[in-house]
Image (tube, rainbow, N blue to C red):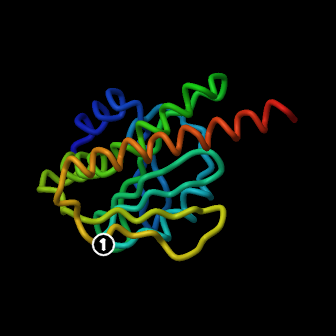
Amino acid sequence: MYEDELIFLEKTASIDIFEYSEQGIKTILDSPKHYDHGLMIRAAKLSREGFYSLIKYNSSYMLLVPLAKDKGLILSPKIDSLNNSESSFSNIDFINHSTSLAKLAYFLYTKESAPNWNLVIYNLNEISDPVQQVQPMKNLHNFHRYANKMVDYFAQLDEKNLRYTLIK
């Protein structure tokens, strides 16, 4: 493992990186992190080799990057509990770049080319069949339009939730 490169990725991408294995969850950077490790272990059990997994839970996300059968990385956007609007934008950026982040983390950890795996999306709040990207996008223009629409839809969902929370 190449900790210096992963620490650099944590700081520049504004993410936290954890390593999961049968022994549990451990941080890459030694600073204390206040995350629900039980939730992370539950999410790590969804990880499968051959797929990068984007996990939605409550109002945040995690990205699972499998390295071996029962070992991998968990990437999560840094959360500022005092600034919810910033966290929403952080989530959108994280979702939009999830495959690139997964490949970069894989490469930095293993120093091997990252596999060109599909992304599987799980909603940990209501586990059901995963949504899988089966065919890679061949037309990058269409992919760009699709990604922009997806970000817009996520922004609208967050806005509705924010309004609902403010009304309460």
Residue shown at 53% from the left, 44% from the top: 154
The answer to whether 145 is drawn above or below residue 120 in the figure is: above
Question: 143 or 99, which lies in front?
Answer: 143
Q: Is residue 1 visible?
A: no
Query: Disc 1 designates what residue?
Result: 134
Asked if one can make out residue 101 in the rendered structure from this viewpoint, the answer is yes
Q: Height in image: 98 above or below 68?
A: above
For label 1, the SS is: loop
Q: Position of residue 5 (x, y in %)?
A: 23, 36
Residue drawn 26% across and 47% down?
Answer: 100
Q: Quadrant of the C terminus?
A: top right
Is 30 on the left or on the right of 100, as rendered? right
Q: Position of residue 135 (x, y in %)?
A: 25, 70
The residue positioned 64% from the left and 35% from the top of the image is 159
Count of numbered labels shown in the rendering: 1
Kind of residue at badge 1: Val
- How crowded pointer 1 is (Cα within 10 Å; few <14, some 14-19, many 20+) is rated as few
Query: Where is 137 relative to 97, above or below?
Result: below
Q: Residue at x 54, y 62 (%)?
A: 41
Would residue 159 be found to the left or right of residue 166 on screen? left
Q: Nearer the viewer, residue 155 or 69?
A: 155
Q: Position of residue 157 (x, y in %)?
A: 61, 44
Q: Is residue 78 left or right of residue 105?
A: right
Give residue 143's position: percent from left, percent from top.
Answer: 27, 51
